[in-house]
Image: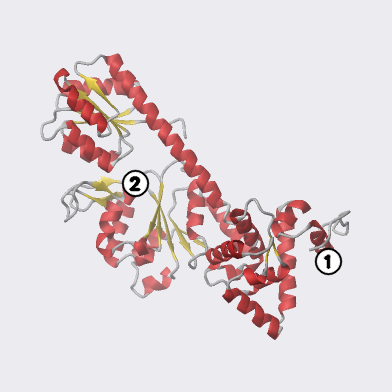
Amino acid sequence: MKDDFRIRFLIVDDEPTIRKLCMQVAESLGFLCLEAESAEAALRLVQSESPELVVTDLRLPEESGVELLERIKSAQPRTEVAIMTGHGSIDSAVEAMRLGAYHYITKPFAIEELKLILERMAEKVRLVAERDFLRDRVNAEAELNRITGSSPSIQHVLRLVGRLKDTRTPVLITGESGTGKELVARAIHFQGPFAQRPFVAVDCSSLVPTLIESELFGYEKGAFTGAVKTRPGLFQAAQGGTIFLDEVAELPLEMQSKLLRVLQEKELRPVGSTSNVKVDVRVIAASNRDLDSAYRAGAFRKDLYFRLNVVAVHVPPLRERKSDIPLLARCFLDRFAPNLSLAITPAATNALLQYDWPGNVRELENCIERAVTLRNHDRIEVGDLPSAVRTVATLVFETGANAPTDLEDLERMTIQRVFEQVGGDKMLAGKMLGISRATLYRKLKRYNIGGDASTRPAAGPPN
């Protein structure tokens, strides 16, 4: 977490003197302060400003502090709320704690008492934020390791990620299903300075058409049948961070128009609300469709296309970077069998290289997971692969359609790139390629890769 993280504090009380005193104490602690004189005004601020700390009087003009507590916890579960109460209402304050209040403050209160409670609430907020940040960071690093490959096309993608991670520029990621578009979006977000802020992924193709607007922009209580409480949308959940709109082309044209307004005005209006809410989010969109053709055909808004397509990143299909397949397969083996020294036989590797992978990297991942689960030996053989992969390999073998030459070229390029990637470390190169040191030395000599490739290891049978 960054050291300049500042707590947002909201005091809710109909007495101006109480609000002023509480804000003075909060400001002395370095908090950003907000005030409201009623529950409705407080809820509007909770929705637009997302305060981390709230102190509310038990008795408010329209509804009780306990009712406000329940509505705040429903909309913002991580917001910490303390209740101020008189001596005669201690039972109500205890009930509020049962419903999720952090503590209660008895009026009249000493300034030091209020200060101590606020400090403790702030410490809890910081600890929770730190925990979530570290957990997301670890998860993100694990995900980023899945962007694997030494082919020129995937290296170009990684270079673009490096340039975009420090900016707030909108990005459009294109590529077939299964190529790893969301991984690229996560890399852009989590490798940059905004990594500690929210990353919210939205699969636009899975949203129910009649509920898309309320999911993205939120809604007010009573906005429609079933809206029993106010709920913020996914854009508000991403406040200050990144929202990833996967398969954005699946949004209806009417929704595209509303999305364009949010991007232009940086504000939205929840369903059923009469006021706008400011939002500050970076938008990364993705699509497996050709949006250039889609907007020309009238299926996608031209103005939204150009608003999203400030920088485009194309993730290539796996069939266009087959030299990465052995390295990807090795990575998946290490993930699904971390405590086993499994290898992929040359015949199985050849089968993987011959297949065109219409499902791309995701299909290869599923293939290796299946092979690890169903294998009967300490290695992955052709028989462990899915029938579609085996069938293509059999046809190539039977027809002899230039397979040896193609495979040798792919093998040479793969070994060359891996060898360069690991800086000439033969032990690491062998592990990444899934072959023994003896086999690696033999192939280095065969393809004239590395200055001392002719030196064979003292022992160890070839694969």
Report the number of discs: 2
Figure check: 426 above or below 358: above
Residue toward you, 41 or 462: 462
Figure check: 391 above or below 54: below
Q: What quarter of the picture does the C terminus occupy?
A: bottom right
Residue wearing tag 1: 446
Q: Residues within 10 Å of mark 1 (few under 14, many from 20)?
A: few
Give the residue furthest to the bottom.
Answer: 399
Q: Is residue 76 among the parts visible in the rendering?
A: yes
Residue wearing tag 2: 237
Residue toward you, 259 or 217: 217
Amino acid type assigned to the residue bearing label 1 in the image? Arg
Amino acid type assigned to the residue bearing label 2 in the image? Ala
Left or right relative to 308: residue 232: left
C-beta proximity under 8 Å, tags 2 and 1:
no
Identified at 28% across, 59% down, the residue is 212
Q: Residues within 10 Å of mark 2 (few under 14, many from 20)?
A: many
How far apart marks 2 and 1 lie (CA) works out to 56 Å
Q: Secondary structure at mark 2?
A: helix
Figure check: 339 above or below 249: above
Please state the horizontal and vertical placement of residue 196, each as a whole percent of the image. Answer: 45, 40
- Quadrant of the image occupied by residue 128: top left
Q: Is residue 316 among the parts visible in the rendering?
A: no
Please state the horizontal and vertical placement of residue 228, each as a whole percent of the image. Answer: 18, 49
Please state the horizontal and vertical placement of residue 137, each as a whole percent of the image. Answer: 50, 43
Mark closer to the chain start, 2 or 1: 2
Q: Secondary structure at mark 1?
A: helix
Please state the horizontal and vertical placement of residue 317, each as a whole percent of the image. Answer: 55, 68
